[in-house]
Amino acid sequence: MVQVEKGTPVLNAARKAGIVIPTLCYHEALKPYGACRLCMVEILQNKKRRLATSCNLPAEAGMEVFTDTAPVRKIRSQILELLLARCPEAPLLQAMARRMGINTTGLKKKDDSDCILCGLCVRFCEEVVGVSAIGLSNRGTDREVTTPFNKASEACIGCGSCTYICPTGCIEMKLDNTSSRLHTMKLGRLSHIPCSHDGRCESCDTDLEFMNDIKEVLTQFRNKFNEKG
């Protein structure tokens, strides 16, 4: 049994209790988003059962949470198979599939994009960096991560946070040939070596080092901006 403050997300309560719930779109530095759906759990409340995403579900008194039932395992496996069909070469997805006992997917890959549309890069750029240089555009099968009007963004400060936080390693940032201060973002398959904890752990050394680096970059950028102002 574990005690948490009222309103604490079920995912955080489970982690405090030492229970592992898989996630892709969750990061402790960002607001819960619930995009990847891998953190699904089964809830029993008021004698009714339902599936819900644990990252943005507040824990409540009298709520029973089941993290390893047949419906939960089934929905997670189905979601992961869909992600593998989209990004079969992503090391993180392959590692998660092995842990779930998934060796292959019967689904056919639709395109050459390794982007799973988790929104981590977009949200980090907006919530932590504070510049919103990239965003999600279009809907349905045409949805994609891009810069405004698909051009190099003047808001980009070149911090590299989008390339770091991407779970499939599909983002590359390059200097724009037309200007030394602009960057272009390229989506495609890149060599991506996850950390020893599969890249999605809470406050591991890799994450802490990155957060310290990004704070330093942001401080330098803002100081330079204030000097110009």
Image (spheres, rainbow, N blue to C red):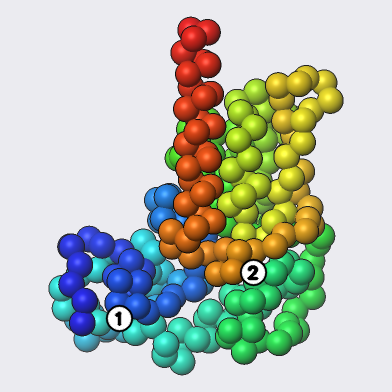
- Which residue matches tag 1? 65
Q: Is residue 219 left or right of residue 66?
A: right
Nearest to viewer (mark 2 / mark 1):
2
Asked if 23 appears above or below 68 in the picture, the reply is above
Q: Residue at x 48, y 65 (%)?
A: 201
Residue nearer the viewer, 4 or 10 = 4
> On the image, which quarter does residue 15 sit in?
bottom left
Q: Amino acid at mark 1?
A: Val
Rendered image quadrant of residue 158: top right
User: Which element is circle 2 on?
Assistant: helix
Residue 216 seen in this snapshot: yes
Q: Residue at x 18, y 72 (%)?
A: 3
Secondary-structure class at tag 1: strand
Mark with earlier residue (2, 1): 1
Looking at the picture, how far across and down is residue 174, in whole percent? Answer: 77, 36
Kindly identify the amino acid type of the residue bearing the numbered disc 2: Leu
- For disc 2, the marked residue is 92
